[in-house]
Image (spheres, helix red, strand yellow):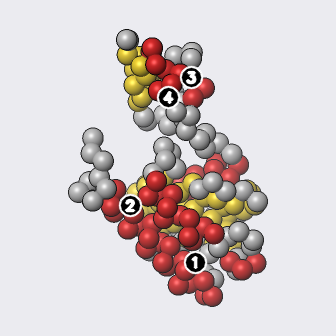
Amino acid sequence: MGVDVTRRQGQAAPEVGAALPPDPDAVQLILADEAASAVRAAPAFTSARHRLADRAALLLAEPPPGRSGGTLPAELDVSVRAVPGLDRVFGEAPGVVEAWADGAVRVARGRGGVVVRVHGDEWSLVLRVGGRVLVVLDALPESVLRVDRDRDWAPEVAAMVDAVLRELDRRAPGGDRYLGG
C-alpha cells in the first residue's frame, strides 16, 4: 500500500482530487489503495454565502488602514424577528463548533482583533470577540446581517457568542476536547 502526500492546492491523485476540500494550508495523507473508501468528501465551502462570510471575517480581522470599525460592504442592521430562520443560528452555532467539521470553523487574529467564522448548513456566522456579530444566510447570500444591535435579542446573541467561545476554548490546546497533534 503506497502513501501519496498531496498538497491540496496542487495536483491531487486523480481518483481523489474531487473529494479534497479547498484548504490550501492543509496536507492530507492519501492511502493510494484505499483512496475511494478512506477519503470522505468534506463540504466545499464555495457558495456565495461562504465567500461573503469569509470576506467579512477577513475585513474584520484585517480592516483596511483607517477603516477599522467602519461598516462592511453589504452589512445591514436587522431585527432578528424580521428575518425568517435567523433565530436558528443562535441555537445551532455552538453545535457546529462542537462538531468541528473540516473547514467549518476558522479563527483569525489581526489588527481588528480576534474573529471567529463558523459555517453552518444554511448560514454562516462571523463574530469579532467583544464586537460585531454578523450572519449570512443562504436565503440572503448577498447581505451581511448585523444582529448584535438588536436589543430585543441581546441576551440570545450574547449567550450564543459565549457558547461558541466556550466550545473554541474546549478545542484549544489544554482544553478538555483537545485532540492533539
Foreground: disc 2 or disc 4: 4
How far apart marks 2 and 3 lie (CA) works out to: 30 Å
**Label annotation for residue 17:** 3
Q: Does label 2 or label 3 sit earlier along the sequence?
A: 3
**Residue closer to the observer: 90 or 154:** 90
- Asked whether the beta carbons under mark 2 and mark 1 sit within 8 Å of each other, the answer is no
* Residue found 53% across the figure and 64% down from its top: 93
Whole-angstrom CA distance, mark 1 to mark 3, is: 40 Å
* Structural crowding at the residue carrying mark 1, measured as other residues with C-alpha within 10 Å and reported as few (<14), some (14–19) or many (≥20): many
* Residue indicated by mark 4: 39
Check if mark 2's residue and mark 4's residue have beta carbons within 8 Å.
Answer: no
The residue lying at 43 percent from left, 35 percent from top is 25
Cα distance in 3D space between marks 1 and 4: 39 Å
Q: Looking at numbered disc 3 in the image, what kind of residue is underneath it? A: Gly
Residue of label 2: 168
Tell me which label, 2 or 4, sits earlier in the chain: 4
Q: Going by the picture, which residue comes out furthest to the left?
A: 174
Residue 33 percent across, percent down from the top left = 45, 14
Q: Nearer the viewer, mark 2 or mark 1?
A: 2
Pointer 3 or 4: first along the chain: 3
Q: What residue is at 54 percent from the left and 30 percent from the top?
A: 20
| Proximity of marks 1 and 3: CB atoms separated by less than 8 Å | no
Q: Which residue is mark 1?
A: 148
Amino acid identity at mark 4 = Val
- Closer to the camera, 17 or 25? 17
Q: Residue at x 42, y 34 (%)?
A: 26
Decide if residue 169 is in sight here. yes
Query: In the rendering, at what x and y percent does residue 136 appear?
Result: 66, 61
Q: Quadrant of the C terminus?
A: top left
Tell me: residue 179, above or below residue 60.
above
Distance from the alpha carbon under mark 2 to that under mark 1:
20 Å
